[in-house]
């Protein structure tokens, strides 16, 4: 709105209309008209020597318009007092989705306050994106629970992309700036563990799985499995051994890990081979996953044709035997608190002068 004053002092003498009232009138008037696509220009107002010229620019609502339009539902008022230009921005907050700022200059939309009606959702989403663009925001995170899955097509039409999905929701993202997207991609890896458990008789705890590739038929292998969300490697491998065989164990160290790519759904795979100490003897097989389990002499385990004929398996066995002969040290677990996030985290490393490791490098 542009306000030109013939006499600035005359403001104090105006009894009929104040600038504040004019601003409120213009804003509320435009609010009522914007829904119908009407551009508004209030008439001139005269008041005892006070001339106020009000000019107003607004972009009307268009159901087919792109969210990239800069001024959608954004009103700019320009006015002049004693030769000085002033500009202010007015935005209807009631048409902005409930959201919070993240620490990277982005937006986290509150999934609990999303409109259920798809048409209303589209309207408010467009208004919100325009508002956040004016505010200089960057990435937008939209979490859609299962009960609001009807909103997914609308979000896609407005430019949102899939990021990841879990059992109860799909996460979508939108990058506002006209520059390369800096949002982190979805998790790129799955994490597996395998437990080498050897008793005081030099026997290895081995299993045969019910469901395995034909090439692995008849193989006696170490218990393996996947780490679940928010689980440590050293606790996950103990859990997997317990679930498959019923044997309680104590984590000793990570002996080695393998990194492979395009393993499952184009994801990469990290597999940690861990040394464990048995705390029990009685085997109790998990009938859902395991065909059989037993304690097998180390020599017999090593001489299996499938192990001797596979470079990866054979190298893991070589590492295991070197560790038993104290010619190799794995990575022991150390839990530390970092000042970067004040959280407890796990660091895996070894030191040759640590008396508790009881091993030496080859």
Image (cartoon, helix red, strand yellow):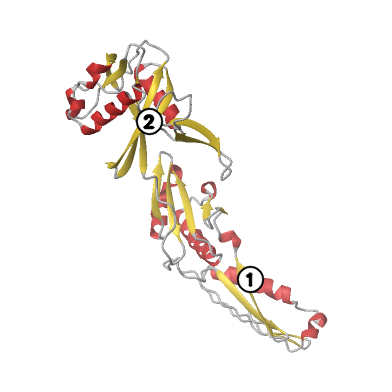
Q: Position of residue 4 (x, y in %)?
A: 69, 85
Please tell me which residue lies in front, 204 or 349: 349
Task: Give the position of the N terminus as an image quadrant.
Answer: bottom right
The CA span between labels 2 and 1 is: 76 Å
Q: In the drawing, does residue 155 fall left or right of residue 345?
A: left
Q: Relative to 296, does residue 23 appear above or below in the rendering?
A: below
The residue carrying mark 2 is: 361
Residue depth check, mark 2 versus mark 1: number of the one nearer the observer? 2
The residue carrying mark 1 is: 27
Locate residue 178: give its quadrant: bottom left
Q: Residue at x 62, y 76 (%)?
A: 77
Q: Please indicate, yes or no, whether residue 196 appears anywhere in the rendered image.
A: no
- At mark 1, the secondary structure is helix
Q: In the drawing, does residue 52 fall left or right of residue 329?
A: right
Mark 1 crowd level (few <14, some 14–19, many ≥20, 10 Å Cα): some
Q: Residue at x 33, y 27 (%)?
A: 224
Q: Position of residue 303 (x, y in %)?
A: 20, 20
Q: Position of residue 274 (x, y in %)?
A: 37, 27
Mark 2 crowd level (few <14, some 14–19, many ≥20, 10 Å Cα): few
Q: Are marks 2 and 1 in contact (CB under 8 Å)?
A: no
Please tell me which residue lies in front, 125 or 321: 321
Q: In the drawing, does residue 38 fall left or right of residue 213?
A: right
Q: Position of residue 233 (x, y in %)?
A: 42, 31
Please tell me which residue lies in front, 111 or 270: 270
- At mark 2, the secondary structure is loop
Q: Relative to 261, does residue 319 appear above or below in the rendering?
A: above
Task: Give the position of the C terminus as an image quadrant.
Answer: top left
Q: Earlier in the sequence, mark 2 or mark 1?
A: 1
């Amino acid at each position: 709105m542009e306000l030109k004053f013939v006499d600035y002092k005359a403001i104090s003498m105006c009894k009929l209309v104040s600038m504040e009232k004019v601003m409120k009138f213009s804003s509320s008037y435009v609010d009522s008209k914007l829904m119908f696509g009407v551009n508004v220009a209030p008439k001139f107002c005269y008041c005892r020597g006070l001339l106020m010229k009000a000019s107003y620019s607004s972009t009307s609502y268009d159901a087919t318009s792109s969210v990239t339009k800069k001024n959608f539902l954004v009103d700019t008022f320009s006015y002049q007092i004693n030769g000085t230009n002033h500009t202010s921005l007015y935005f209807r907050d009631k048409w902005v989705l409930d959201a919070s700022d993240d620490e990277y200059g982005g937006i986290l939309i509150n999934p609990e306050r999303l409109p259920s009606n798809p048409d209303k959702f589209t309207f408010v989403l467009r208004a919100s994106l325009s508002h956040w663009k004016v505010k200089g925001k960057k990435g937008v995170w939209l979490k859609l629970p299962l009960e609001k899955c009807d909103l997914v097509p609308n979000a896609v039409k407005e430019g949102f992309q899939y990021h990841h999905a879990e059992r109860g929701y799909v996460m979508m993202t939108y990058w506002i700036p006209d520059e390369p997207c800096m949002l982190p991609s979805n998790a790129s890896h799955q994490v597996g563990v395998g437990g080498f458990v050897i008793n005081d008789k030099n026997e290895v705890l081995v299993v045969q799985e019910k469901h395995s590739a034909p090439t692995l038929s008849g193989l006696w292998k170490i218990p393996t499995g996947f780490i679940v969300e928010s689980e440590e490697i050293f606790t996950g491998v103990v859990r997997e051994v317990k679930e498959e065989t019923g044997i309680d164990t104590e984590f000793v160290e990570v002996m080695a890990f393998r990194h492979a790519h395009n393993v499952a759904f184009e994801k990469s795979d990290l597999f940690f081979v861990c040394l464990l100490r048995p705390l029990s003897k009685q085997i109790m097989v998990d009938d859902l996953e395991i065909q059989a389990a037993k304690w097998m002499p180390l020599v017999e385990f090593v001489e299996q044709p499938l192990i001797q004929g596979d470079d990866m398996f054979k190298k893991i066995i070589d590492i295991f035997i070197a560790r038993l002969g104290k010619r190799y040290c794995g990575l022991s677990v150390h839990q530390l608190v970092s000042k970067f996030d004040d959280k407890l985290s796990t660091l895996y490393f070894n030191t040759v002068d640590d008396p508790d490791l009881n091993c030496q490098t080859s």
